[in-house]
Structure formats: C-alpha cells, structure tokens
C-alpha cells in the first residue's frame, strides 16, 4: 500500500447544502475552500465534520503531550 493510499478520507459537511462527503486528507483544505467560494460567496459554511475535527484535535493533543497524558500508557 502506498503512502498516498494510507491517508484517511475526512468527512466534510455543509449544513446549508445538506451535504456530507469524504475527501482525501491532502485535499480537504482546497475542497472546503472551493465549495465555499463557488456556492457560498466565500463564507465559511462547509467544514470538516466538527465531531471528527474535535476527535482529531484531542488525539493530536494527547500525542503531543499537551494534556499531560502519556499516549504510550
């Protein structure tokens, strides 16, 4: 399996459009920006699913030791 295929797909949601899609990790920023520019006059409406973003942020914080937890225990 290649490194590119190892990258997860990230759920992106737009409450205004009622859509949800999976976007490859490396394309998330561009896809969200493009959607918002084309459909919402640049307003930040579409976004990474907030629940997923919170989980990713928490995991990253634990791995970086920001919470005082040891991720290896």
Image (tube, rainbow, N blue to C red):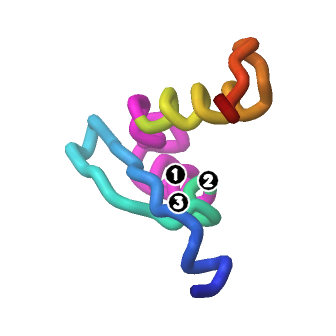
The residue tagged 1 is: 32
Badge 1 element: helix
Whole-Å distance between the Cαs marked 2 and 1? 5 Å
Q: Position of residue 46 (x, y in %)?
A: 42, 42
| Residue under the point 40% across and 39% down | 49
The residue tagged 3 is: 31
Say whether marks 1 and 3 touch (CB < 8 Å). yes
Whole-Å distance between the Cαs marked 1 and 3? 4 Å
Magenta range:
30-51
Specify few, some or many for label 3: CA neighbours under 10 Å numbering under 14, 14-19, or 20 or more. Answer: some
Q: Position of residue 63 (x, y in %)?
A: 72, 34
Specify few, some or many for label 2: CA neighbours under 10 Å numbering under 14, 14-19, or 20 or more. Answer: some
The answer to if 40 sits in the magenta stretch is yes
Q: Nearer the viewer, residue 16 or 3?
A: 3
Q: Is residue 72 left or right of residue 49?
A: right
Say whether marks 2 and 1 touch (CB < 8 Å). yes
Say whether marks 3 and 2 touch (CB < 8 Å). yes
| Residue under the point 39% across and 51% down | 11
The residue tagged 2 is: 29
Relative to 25, is 15 above or below?
A: above
């Amino acid at each position: 399996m290649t490194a590119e295929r190892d990258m997860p797909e990230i759920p992106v949601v737009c409450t205004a459009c009622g859509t949800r899609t999976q976007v490859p990790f490396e394309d998330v920023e561009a896809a969200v920006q493009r959607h918002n520019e084309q459909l919402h006059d640049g307003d930040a409406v579409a976004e990474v699913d907030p629940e997923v973003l919170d989980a990713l942020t928490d995991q990253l914080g634990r791995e970086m030791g920001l919470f005082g937890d040891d991720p290896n225990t």
